[in-house]
Image: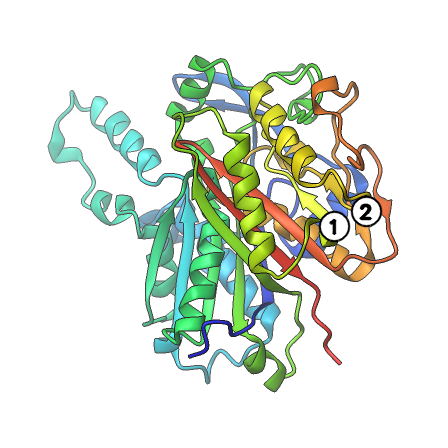
Amino acid sequence: MNSLERIVITGIGLVSPNGNNWTEYRQALLDGRSGVSPYEIRYFGKTIAGICDFPATKYQSRKDIRRGTRAGSISIYCANEAIADSKINWEQIDKSQVGVFIGITEHGNVETENEIYNIKQFDYDCKMWSHFHNPRTVANNPAGEVTLNLGITGAHYCIGAACAAGNAGIIQGVQMLRLGEVDLALAGGVSESIHTFGIFAAFAAENALAYHEIPSQASRPFDKKRNGIVISEGGCIYTLERLTDAKKRKAKIYGEIAGYAMNSDATDFVLPNAERQIECMSKAINKAGLVPEQIDIVSTHATATTLGDIQEINALRNLFKNSDKTYINNTKSFIGHAMGAAGVLELAGNLPSLEDGIIHPTINCSELDPECEIRNLVIDKPHKVEKVNYILNNSFGMVGTNCVIIVGKVDQD
């Protein structure tokens, strides 16, 4: 198999706090509609979060939903939606040549917290511990639930890469297609994080949990008064195929994975490193055979933490200092931080720009932090350009993991 085989996106399935399909989600971004709302979770109490409301029973029985996990249900919904969107002949496809590669920030905390809460009601009698706990908490669970639901017998696993995991899931799908290990990849990322009180408590302990009297305005990347992360759930899974296969079946092509890169900061557990971010973006751009001036949109990772936003803007200023046509936006301002699903949802929000040339804005930035000022930052209103050929999608995670993907427009004539 040719290691440089061109890989394209042919289907999109997603669940987000402000939309359960690609069209609905994109319209929310163009309309400036946030998906963040009030939320309450045991032990921690009242807070805010990006909460998803999707029809899980569309693809699962109520029994399967009870037996499985929230991350599994999100994954199953997204995978089925992506397959339907791709219009691939699912009944005829060889299921042993389908792979499932899903990025996760963490998995199992929700289920373990639930079991501990349950046995507490019985004086911590472990006989009351669910026999479903082990299959619910293994790291491959979300991807595995997809294979059970769809009868897929090819490879499946989850990729743990903190908040860069969604992008890493796509890269894994690309590599497996190029190796010839699969002929169709279901790749992306999911998160059930809002269902664990521990993540709220931990971010609060770090003084990094967002708060605002108006929940929809809480996620404020680049704003002078930003005060932290809005935790969200969600997911996005893409069908990835070789370009030759996609064209053979006359599939609609959303874009090509033109370049990608991963690296490590190796400097701190939490604080990002702008130099390593520059290196990661540069490597992806070089792998795509491009120069920075050819990137039309940078979809930022910016989470609305003080230093995180500044470090990323510093990296972008350095790398794109000679480009006056590169526009910059942020999607977390609408949906909060969906952890393992963040990068893939953010990419999905920008993919339509390859067709319509409209760049969705960053919202909730009413007073731009001077340290986050950068040329062509799109704020408040969508911006129309003549054409968009390349989107660079940034995802950076804790313990210094960085992942960048570049998606390019494909001529389908």
Left or right: where 357 falls relative to 38: right
Is residue 338 shown to the viewer in this render? Answer: no
Name the residue located 45 percent from the left edge and 82 percent from the top edge: 93
Q: Nearer the observer, disc 1 or disc 2?
A: 1
For the residues labelled 1 and 2, the Cα–Cα distance comes to 7 Å
Colour mapping: rainbow
- In the image, what residue occupies the spot 66% across and 27% down? 221
Q: Vertical placement of 382 versus 257: above or below?
A: above
Q: Secondary structure at mark 2?
A: loop
- Secondary structure category for the residue under label 1: helix
Q: Position of residue 398 (x, y in %)?
A: 43, 32
Residue 89's place in the image compared with 225, above or below, is: below
**Residue picked out by circle 1:** 293
Question: On the rendered image, what quadrant is the C terminus found in?
Answer: bottom right
Cβ atoms under marks 1 and 2 closer than 8 Å: yes
Q: Amino acid at mark 2?
A: Lys
Location of mark 2 (residue): 325
Residue at 46% x, 67% y is: 185
The location of residue 166, given as percent across then percent down, is: 49, 48
Q: Is residue 153 left or right of residue 121?
A: right
Q: How many marks?
A: 2
Residue 197's label in the rendered image is: none
Query: Along the horizontal axis of the image, is 123 left or right of 56?
Result: left
Q: Looking at the picture, does residue 338 appear above or below residue 220?
A: below
Q: Position of residue 244 (x, y in %)?
A: 57, 81
Q: Quadrant of residue 352?
A: bottom right
Q: Residue at x 45, y 15 (%)?
A: 206
